[in-house]
Every structure is written in C-alpha cells, then in structure tokens.
Image (spheres, rainbow, N blue to C red):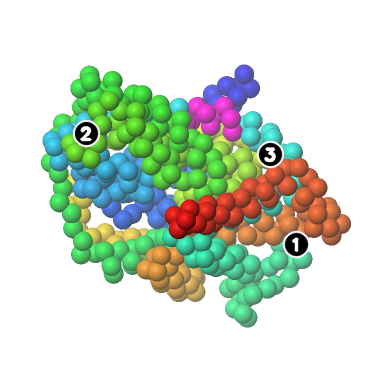
Amino acid sequence: MDTWTQLMGGFAAAATPVNLMWAFIGCVIGTAIGVLPGLGPAVTVAMLLPITTQVEPTASMIFFCGIYYGAMYGGSTTSILLNTPGETGTMVTALEGFKMAKHGRAGAALATAAIGSFVAGTIATILVTLFAPVVAEFAVRLGPPEYFMLMLLAFTTVTAVLGKSVLRGLTALFIGLAFGLIGMDQISGQVRYTGGVPEFMDGIEVVLVAVGLFAVGETLYNALYEGRSSSQMNRLTRVHMTRTEWRRSWPAWLRGTALGFPFGTIPAGGSEIPTFLSYATERKLSKHKEEFGTTGAIEGVAGPEAANNSAVTATLVPLLTLGIPTSVTAAILLSALQNYGINAGPQLFQTSSDLVWALIASLYIGNVMLLVLNLPLVGLWVKLLKIPKAPLYAGILIFATVGVYGMRQSAFDLVLMYAIGLLGVLMRRYDFPTAPVIVGMILGPLAEAQFRNALSIGEGRWTVFLERPMSAALLAVVVAVLVLPRAWKWYARRSASA
C-alpha cells in the first residue's frame, strides 16, 4: 500500500504541465535520434548534459529518460525500412523486419515493433515499481566490502562483454579509472595527477568526457569514415496488423519481455544478448519457420523489440538502487544525477523519494506518449532520414561546443573536450569500447573509497572480503566471469582437435 501511495504521489509530480512538457520533448527528441542512423541515446544525453545547470533535477531526469526510451522506439524504424539499426539493441529487428518490408509488409513490422515496445515497457515499468524498493531495502544492509565487490563485478563484466577483446576493454577501463583519479583525493584531500594544471584541481567533469567521447567522437568518426555511405529505403505501407498477425505477435511480446528484464538488471547485461535469445526462441517455437530469413516472420520482430525495451527499462533498477549503471546511457544518467549532488544508491529512495517516484511515474506516461507518437507519425519520422549528414553532424558539434562552454565559460574545457573527442575517434577506429571509460571514471573514485573503508573495517586485513558471505559470493562471480569463458574456449579447442 505504501508503494501505491508513493506511486500516486509520483504521478501527481510527473503530471504537472512543466514535467509533462519535458517528458514530451524528451520522447520526441529520442524518437528522432533513434530514427537517424549512427546516433543514439548515449550521444544525445551526453550532448544535452549541460542542461542540468539550468533545469531542476526531476524535470531533467524525466527529459533524459524520455530520450532514452524514445531512441529504443525510433531505432526500429531504420532497422525495418533501411536495414540500418539506429541502435545496437535493434540489430536483430533488422533480420526479419527488413525482409518483411521488402515483401510489402513494412507497416505490420513497424506496428508490432511499436506496440511490442509499449507492452514490454509497461510490464517492465510495473516490475521496476514493485521490485526497486525491495532491492533498495536489501541494499541498505550492504557494507563497503559488498559495494566494492559489486563495483568490481561491474568493471569485470563491462570489460569482458563489451568490445571484441578483453584486453581492449581493460585498456578502456583503465583510461576511465585514470581520468577519475585526477584532482583531489576524496578522503585525504591531497591533490594528485594534475600535472601542475590548475583546471584539473577539481577533477575532470564527467559531462565533458561523455560529450567528448560520444557526441564529438561519434560525430567525427561518422563524418570521417561513414559519411559517404547510403542505403536504399523500402516503401512505407500503412501501419496496421491483421488479426492473424496480432495472434502471432502477443505471445512473442510476453516472451521477449520475460527474457529482457533480467538482463537489464545485471552489470553489462545490455539489450543485445536478450534480443538474440528472443530471436532464437521465436524461431524455434514458430509454426511458420519457412518465413524466417525469406519473407520475414513477424515473431522475429515482435520478440526482439519487446526484449530490447524490457531490458532498457530494467537498467533503472541497479542504477537507482545500487548506483551501478548497466549500460552506457545509464552511466551518463548517473553523471546527470551527480551534477545535482544526488548520489544514486540504496539511500536514494529515502533522500530523494519524490524524484524517484516522479521518474518511475513518468515512464508510464512516456510509454503512452511514445505509442501515440510512433504509430500515427511514423511517416513523419521517416522524413528525418532525408536530412543531409554534413549539416546534421555540424549541428551536433556546435551544440556540444556551446553546451560545454556554457558550464564554466572555460576555453580550456573546449580544448579538452575536442582532445577527448579525438581519443574517441581513435578508440572507435581500432575497436576499443568507449563504455568502460565512462563506467571507470564514475565508479572508480567510489570503488576506491569503498575499498579503503572496507580495509578500515577489517583493520587492514585483505581477508575481510572473504569473511563476509555476500562479498565472497560476489568475488566468486567475478572470478567466474573471467575464468569460465576462457576455460570453455580451451575445452572446445581441445575437443575439436581430439
């Protein structure tokens, strides 16, 4: 009953005209960004982070979550019509959606993607409403050893899962950790690693790094290496489904939701794994196997889209309750909270309960907004694909420059932003994942503080991490993440050579 009362209070806050306006603007921008290939919510949220200096916390978080949600909805449009995923989570949608579009069924594919996203997003938001407070209550009992192990697990899974090489992932993580160490020591107050540059005394702003790596880096990379690419678009048909397509879609929506939610709650679970699992499941269970890979099966669009949106919503559980981001965009949302001096974690539900419940309520409202925006207005979103790339990229660079300069009116920040942008281009060019940089920069100082507090509790004994059951279990999971994949590859090679 207490949860219901708090949720109603959240709806009262989220439904104010100002917050509804920010939710609507976020959904519109997010959908537009999702439609445009090569851009994504991480780039957009990073580019708009400087807005946190002008807008109050609840409105800006509702705005950013609208962008995050909207990009997931909009990303399916280019996957289906162009075979060019707007977001990594919609890669699987392109497999069957593009084939449906080629055979004159683009409307049905777009409809099942939009409605499936709505169903999955709504169910996942209900699960967040029910389980986030429970997780927060449990997390309050965790101490520094458990929190350090949770952050170590986040570091390990991010570097192991993202990118083509664990070594490259670790390199990116250590770059982020190095950025996070610059400035004053949180505990002793000693200045370190500034190189005599006074601007580094307060550390490097996470906003600046996020804008440099994602907005500037991605834009420069697309302009340099992908600017000349073009795709042929399939004809857009009327957005509706037949009764048979409805009957085939709804079980896939539910199965996709069930697969996506757990993956969204674990560090670096991401939306790619559950979408592939959902596609494989639908292909196995379908009574129309002959349509897969030929004319396009609607289950192959419905399931992965639901899994994608369910996983995206689930990222809010560890973000709000533990302060641990499980995706790139979640990491940037965490930095937005930190800009307001708000620390995400188990105490957030007590210290900033109005913000949390308004944010959760806005997810219900945003889902309805996005369904209304995506079904009737899909023809309008498709017109965005006609924007020339040169002015689009130039506009993003101008927006990023103005935003970062507006934070402290510092020319040094601009030079640093573009230097980090060039680093982002090099990382992208040589397949170094950028997500570990942000995760390392945000969680690094927190992990350092928790590590030192844990050693203080254990009176300098390293065994404190093994003496507490929860931290020992988390350490075992970290070791398993590092060892088991390599052991499996070694066993597979040995079996193949035998």
Disc 2 versus disc 3: nearer the observer? 2
The percent coordinates of residue 2 (x first, y second) are 63, 22
Q: Secondary structure at mark 3?
A: helix
Q: Nearer the viewer, residue 326 or 189?
A: 326
Instruction: Say if 448 sits above or below 278 in the image.
Output: below
Specify the label residue 13 is tagged with.
none
Q: Residue 370 occupies which quadrant of the picture?
A: top left
- Judged from the image, the secondary structure of the residue bearing numbered disc 1 is loop
- Rendered image: mark on residue 139: 3
Give the Cα separation between the discs numbered 2 and 3.
47 Å
The percent coordinates of residue 354 (x first, y second) are: 59, 34
Q: What residue is rendered at 33% in x and 67% in y? A: 220
Of the two numbered discs 2 and 1 in the rendering, the one whose residue sits closer to the viewer: 2
Quadrant where the image shows the N terminus = top right
Residue 79 appears anywhere in the view: yes
Q: Earlier in the sequence, mark 3 or mark 1?
A: 3
Q: Note whether 489 is above or below 143 in the view shown.
A: below
Q: Is 372 located above or below residue 32 in the figure?
A: above
Q: Locate residue 311 relative to residue 108 in the image: left or right.
A: right
Q: Earlier in the sequence, mark 2 or mark 3?
A: 3
At 20% from the left edge and 22% from the top edge, which residue is drawn? 242
Q: Which residues are magenta?
A: 124-132
Which sits earlier in the primary sequence, circle 2 or circle 1? 1
Question: Which disc, if any, is residue 291?
Answer: 2
**Do tag 2 and tag 1 residues touch (Cβ < 8 Å)?**
no
Circles 3 and 1 in contact, beta carbons < 8 Å: no
Question: In terms of secondary structure, what is the magenta stretch mainly?
Answer: helix
| Distance between mark 2 and mark 1 Cα atoms | 61 Å
Q: CA distance from mark 3 to mark 1?
A: 23 Å
Query: Label 1 belongs to which residue?
Result: 187
Q: What type is the residue that disc 3 sits on? A: Ala
Percent position of residue 72, x then y = 36, 42
